[in-house]
Amino acid sequence: MTDTVQKETLGFQTEVSKLLHLMIHSLYSNPEIFLRELISNASDAADKLRFEALTHADWLSEDPELKIWIDVDKEAKTITLRDNGIGMSRQEVIDNLGTIARSGTSEFVKNLTGDQKKDAQLIGQFGVGFYSAFVVAQKVEVYTRRAGVAASEAVKWESEGEGAFTVESIDKAERGTTIVLHLRPTQEEFADAFRLKNIIHKYAEHIAIPVCMKAQKWNDEGKEEVGDYEAVNKAAALWTRPRNEISEEEYQGFYKHIAHDYENPLAWNHNKVEGKLEYTSLLFVPKRAPHDLYQRDGVRGLKLYVQRVFIMDDAEQFLPMYLRFVKGIVDSNDLPLNVSRELLQSGKVVDSMKSALTRRVLDMLTSMADSKAEDYAACWAQFGNVLKEGVAEDQSNQDKVLKLLRFASTLSGDAVESVALADYVARMKEGQEKIYYLTAENFTAASQSPHLEVFRKKGVEVLLLTDRLDEWLMTHLTEFDGKQFQHIAKGDLDLGSLSSEEDKKAEEQLQETSQPLVERLQKILADKVQAVKATQRLTDSPACLVRSQYDLGAAMRQLLEASGQKLPESKPTLEINPSHPLVARLSNTNDDARFETLALIVLDQATLAEGSALADPAAYVKRLNSLLMELV
Ligand SMILES: Nc1ncnc2c1ncn2[C@@H]1O[C@H](COP(=O)(O)OP(=O)(O)OP(=O)(O)O)[C@@H](O)[C@H]1O
């Protein structure tokens, strides 16, 4: 490595400087992860070389055994990591080690709050990567030569992590990357082979290629002698090993490696399929949703291998959109090695793998829901809204998806979505035929809705749906376990066999006695409501609004209107509770002007109770005040 030419000093992208600063201050409690990150990069570099060798066989054949070597120099206080992977060109060095390539991470750094504690918690979510070297090193040198590039076109990169780095052309005999870490005085404990081997066991056991260090021996005088390089890790692709020989820690380590996550996954499933199709899958459910879960161009998909050769990241074709949060790998024996994204778009092999993998994920989630309720609750909190998309997207698995849904309910009593449809059905009252639910803007509006009164009286549980997606979701749901869904604020009150003979008689009587009041109200409110009706739905409230069975909910309306669609006006039915004192008062009012004021107040209040906005709030306030003045 001589012949220094073309040395240039370049500045780090602003975000990198920020990231470096934050990293050094937030990872001090766990500095050893630098080794995990650098080994992970070297292993990725080996994967990339194997892939490129499919079209450039000579790149691999000249030095075919892909490995990572780690050396420690106690005197010089350095650690050296060497790999014979793909290496980097000059431009790649500048791009990869001077900027933040991944847009998500760069966005994150731009938005740092400046509050070191908060920022430190966030940082792990973005994969700390190469720059973590500076947590232990005061100076980092990178010597690299890309496969297929002349020895004289190798590059040296060097930085002390403070704003700038240099790049210069060098000679490098072998392909691949060598990284020299000059340890900070406070981190010299890492210049210890034994310590490094322990870290490799902890974090890099799953790495598919050998991570080698020199053997340590002690002679008769108790002095240390170093032997030849030997693999410290097991050095076999994790998914190719038998399940019963892989520890939990190894699965967790592998997940962190492929998902760039710092937390353990919630669950995983490792499976080998033999027969007509042959493939191995290893699928993980993360603990936390990525920041780009709802972005159109967010990262999704599995890592694809064909016969153990890495082919591509983010292969989206193996799982449906609503399972886009699942991470993992799939290794196929049937796909051709030169498979491209375009080729993956269609084809029997991919289709049948997709449907099998989808079922596998749904089964994994179901078994988590059945046996690890707490984990599933965490999973639902993160990915519930994405899973809901599956109800519409995946008709063939709708039954499985329905069982995974969770809702808030009048029984659970809080906004946490924890009630499964199967639990609801198991708790249904004798004579109850339908699954009752209510949609509203938020949990308070839902749980205080007048529509719940009759259900409370009869002790019937109602699901409370307050997510923006829920109205859309319910347009795709007709029944579960043979029971129809019924929105309690839409259509006639239909309690089926929950209504006793007495209820039915009372209903008839109610309609009869309320007829004059209903007609009077109808005249006044003709242009505002569809109809006026006396109701048994209410016990404590004077009135409520009922929508037609096929009416779009408020959230759906907003959504469609925002997308530019013109929707016909929909008028509600006003249902009144004749046994409420205010309605009784209304009934006894002979003064027409006063009747009108009261009628409009009752209508406006029913609108407010529904969580809707008033068309003319000022008029409402004026009317109410005139009544209040009378009281004074
Ligand atoms: N040993 C290496 N050989 C070849 N390229 C490397 C090596 N180390 C790093 N790189 C390149 O530098 C890039 C940046 O590495 P870095 O670790 O910062 O991010 P990453 O690996 O893409 O993701 P993460 O931040 O989650 O680790 C890599 O994507 C890769 O292209």
Image (cartoon, helix red, strand yellow):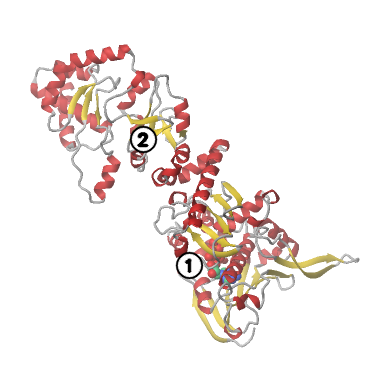
Residue at 54% over, 59% down: 303
Residue 567 location, quadrant: top left
In the foreground, 249 or 315:
315
Which residue is situated farthest in the front direction here? Answer: 276
274 versus 626 height, above or below:
below
Which quadrant holds the C terminus? top left
Q: Kindly state the secondary structure of the residue where label 1 is placed.
A: loop
Asked if labels 1 and 2 touch by Cβ distance under 8 angstroms, the answer is no
Residue 320: percent from the left, percent from the top?
A: 45, 51
* Image disc number at residue 478: 2
- Closer to us: mark 2 or mark 1? 2
Tell which quarter ligand 1 is in. Answer: bottom right
Which quadrant holds the N terminus? bottom right
Q: Kindly state the secondary structure of the residue where label 2 is placed.
A: loop
Identity, as a three-letter code, of the amino acid under mark 2: Thr
Confirm or reject: label 1 Cβ below 8 Å from ligand 1: yes
Which residue is situated farthest in the right direction here? Answer: 220
In the foreground, 16 or 499:
499
